[in-house]
Image (cartoon, helix red, strand yellow):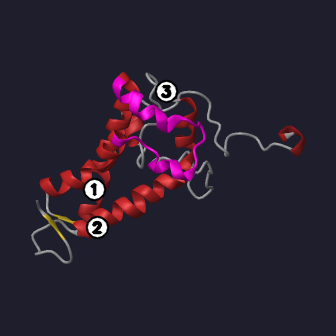
Amino acid sequence: LQGYCGAGNGTEFSLLVQTVIIFVFTDFVEYGYHLLGHKFSFLWSIHRHHHMFYNPSPFSVIADEYLDQFVRTLPMVAIPFMMQVNMDLLFGIFVLLFYGYGVYLHMGYESKALSAHNPFFNTSYHHYMHHAISAKGRPLYTGFFFNCWDHLFDTGYKGACICHECRPERTIEEWN
């Protein structure tokens, strides 16, 4: 194991480089596992419980079965075997950003600060669409943080966008 706490000994990558590696590696593992969870019957039988509601609550970010939770935390064990890594940074990224961002993805609220049309990050809209229309054999928007994987592997939605920027404003009468 090559994990350390504190300042390190000067031979490791900088904290910025470690942050980039942690994000990219973990997000790719999440994308790949999530994609497989929608393609194969055995994995779908485990993951499908997370899809009980098409518009999930913030608490559903951790409402996964044992195998989902195990695989999603494997990077916390694998990364220290692969490189010198600051464990404070690794745990901080997982707790604050992955779980924190997961709460945002599952809250069903589209933030005007992060457009669904931004070229880098998945948003609450993408994850809402994932829960609403993705199923076994139809993996859509299976990325977590970065949307490059969905673009690269063509797992984005091909239909008309219905994000809050693209759909027209409704009147009170239309809501009733």
* Residue at the disc numbered 3: 135
Along the horizontal axis of the image, is 156 left or right of 78?
right
Q: Is residue 102 above or below residue 16?
A: above
Mark 1 surroundings within 10 Å by alpha-carbon count, few (fewer than 14), some (14 through 19), many (20 or more): many
Residue 40 visible in the current orientation = no
Mark nearer the N terminus (1 vs 2): 1
Magenta: main secondary structure = helix
Q: Amino acid at mark 1?
A: Ile
Quick check: is 43 in the magenta stretch? yes
Q: Amino acid at mark 2?
A: Leu
Separation of marks 2 and 3 at Cα, in angstroms = 34 Å
Mark nearer the N terminus (3 vs 1): 1
Residue 15 in percent (x, y) is at 25, 68
* Residue at the disc numbered 2: 89
Mark 3 surroundings within 10 Å by alpha-carbon count, few (fewer than 14), some (14 through 19), many (20 or more): some
Task: Identify the residue at image location x=62%, y=35%.
Answer: 161
* Residue at the disc numbered 1: 22
Task: Identify the residue at image location x=15%, y=74%.
Answer: 8
* The C terminus sits in image quarter: top right
Is label 3 or label 1 in front? Answer: 3
Task: Identify the residue at image location x=55%, y=45%.
Answer: 117
* The N terminus sits in image quarter: bottom left
Q: Which residue occupies the foreground of this view, 28 or 108?
A: 108
